[in-house]
Amino acid sequence: MRFEINKDKLLYHLLIAQKALSNKTPNPALQGVKLDVEANALAITTSNSDISINISVEDGGLDVEEKGSALIPGKYFIEIVRKLDGQTITFSKAEDNLLRIEADHSDITLNTLDLEDYPNIQFTKKDSFIKVNVRTLKTLIRQTAFATSSIENRPILTGVNLTIDGDRLNGVATDSYRLSQKTISLEDTYDKMNVIIPGRSLEELMRILEDNQSDVELHFDQSQVLFKYKNILFQTRLLEGNYPETSKLIPQEYPVQIKFNKEQLITSIERASLLSSRDGQNAIVKLNMRQDDTVEISSNSPEIGRVLEEVYPVDEVVGSPIKIAFSSKYFLEALKVFNSSEVTVKFTGEIRPFVIEGEYDDDMLQLILPVKTD
Amino acid sequence: MRFEINKDKLLYHLLIAQKALSNKTPNPALQGVKLDVEANALAITTSNSDISINISVEDGGLDVEEKGSALIPGKYFIEIVRKLDGQTITFSKAEDNLLRIEADHSDITLNTLDLEDYPNIQFTKKDSFIKVNVRTLKTLIRQTAFATSSIENRPILTGVNLTIDGDRLNGVATDSYRLSQKTISLEDTYDKMNVIIPGRSLEELMRILEDNQSDVELHFDQSQVLFKYKNILFQTRLLEGNYPETSKLIPQEYPVQIKFNKEQLITSIERASLLSSRDGQNAIVKLNMRQDDTVEISSNSPEIGRVLEEVYPVDEVVGSPIKIAFSSKYFLEALKVFNSSEVTVKFTGEIRPFVIEGEYDDDMLQLILPVKTD
């Protein structure tokens, strides 16, 4: 193996591949970045228990002299490439388990890992796949994955439930205290599909996806899904089991509706969260719509102090006065995924779930369960 | 107590006062920010076991309606001020241990701490004090305090030894593996003085001092020193004991001298530190000046790999080939405090301390003890 590559190009792709590297893996081979050098292409592969990434580097900036493969300790490899001077780096196999890295006035020899210990990872593209605009997919992930459960006692809730019905792709996430739902339109029509993808995998994918007009291909398999974006293959396992039926959680009628300026509502809830013994964002905050249609956001921690915020709804309020208490973390996280600058909060009753919607957030709904107080 | 104050002005000063706040103090009163409101001034006081800060806010943006004092839990106080909307905040005492904070549409009531529990802190200005340009003092701290010891088994080495001789102020710090020394000129001449100031106190002070042409006043007392900078009084305890005599550690003759481009030397040592099992910066790195006057910077960790860097000295080298090994952390930290872009490393022998000097770093010297290798 011997090849030359542009430093910035390699680093750019290594930082993407890094998202599937784990330092904590029980299999030391998975701490490695696998390089496969072909006549005109370099393939970079990384994998942990959830995600596998394969990137093919082909265009300018790569000059292969001799084909070959190597498994390189990821931690050192990426730091070395980051710190090297010069535009071009030359990689060559010095001996069987030694990689030589030369650039400018640096000459580095790195012990490599044993290629035979690396699992055989299949990145399985299918003949039929689903095509989604990258920006739309990013939005769906951003607006749902945060609401998955981070505790593992009901593993199914750590995933986002993706379903396809015709030309609609629907994502739902819930940790049983709140629920996020977003539907996007596809250009084509597909067979019905219902899978659960780990929320954390989707969040890593989101960090790789850019904001442009490219497409992402979704190739589904029995136990995994492969996302193909440009020269990147991102594969994640699926969660097994049946996702709970969430549609019946969503109220049908909302006798009380209040429209807020989103930023005002966020800063009021943030301030009301400040004086909490329950560690910041997780404070219990009350919303009280008064007779005069102004809204009070308040909190009270007897040992610390109390906060009272007045917020003026944007439009005329629908319905009669209501008092409701909630976890500020859930309300704030939901508000922050809206693109709209104004949001409507819709209530069914004081101990019933309430939902948030936004004019410029089509087919997106955030639902939050209130907290009972005395 | 009742006063109005400009939000940004208050926050600016609270963030300075915060440097003397500790969440870990055994005395809960010291978690508080003490406010003393006079007819035309607000005094902000904070203190921990090492440092006390007193700031007097007087100019525009303050409107006192009723004098008084309060001791306010620092953590909540600063966060509230940071998060409030509006330009002006009104503070008033609601009841004995309740502070009311009003701004824009926010109305916050905060439990205060008991003023009687707060220690009586004297900020003792003297008739005779030492005057130093703020930028010069910052430089002295930056170039010495980092070399103090961070472990407490010889407490005296956690401090910087400041001595005054005529119109010269000299600072020395050592952790017994390296030594930093910087001397600055004063405008006036003073009596001899010899004190040891905790390095951490000086680092906090450095963060408060700005880069301008103002003066800092140093008021020395038996057990403490007060720095007066603009409207800020910063007081720290002194360390008791005799500082070791360090001047005899510094070699008198340097038969080998090599001048380097500082940035090149830094990046070479950084790369040589990458493949270390000793956790990054603490790697053992070797410097080898060869017969041909080029210099090799190298490291070797059998289980990880090896790095070989070639560095070309800037000028002709003085002396004969030399090999020396050092802790990369010490060499890098020393190099990074130089203002000069070229530095001269001066050697006495392979197991003798070596020093670094820079053309544009007058009266500053960094000394490092080499590491013995086989």
Image (cartoon, coloured by chain):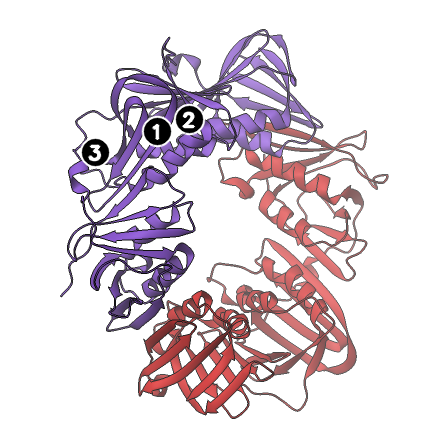
Chain colours: A red, B purple
The residue closer to the viewer here, A16 or A285, is A16
**Residue shown at the point (77%, 42%) measured from the top left:** A260
CA gap between label 3 and label 2 equals 25 Å
Q: Secondary structure at mark 2?
A: helix
The disc, 3 or 2, on the residue closer to the chain's N-terminal end is 2
The disc, 1 or 3, on the residue closer to the chain's N-terminal end is 1
Q: Which mark is residue A130?
A: none
Outermost residue on the left side: it is B374
Q: Which mark is residue B155?
A: 3
The answer to whether residue B118 of the structure is visible from this angle is: yes
Q: Which amino acid type is shown beneath numbered disc 2?
A: Gln
Residue that carries the numbered disc 1 in the rendered image = B25
Image quadrant occupied by the N terminus of chain B: top right
Within 10 Å of the Cα at label 1, are there few (<14), some (14-19), or many (20+) other Cα atoms? few
Locate residue A9 relative to residue B336 in the image: left or right. Answer: right
Name the mark nearer the viewer: 1 or 3.
3
**Residue shown at the point (34%, 34%) measured from the top left:** B200
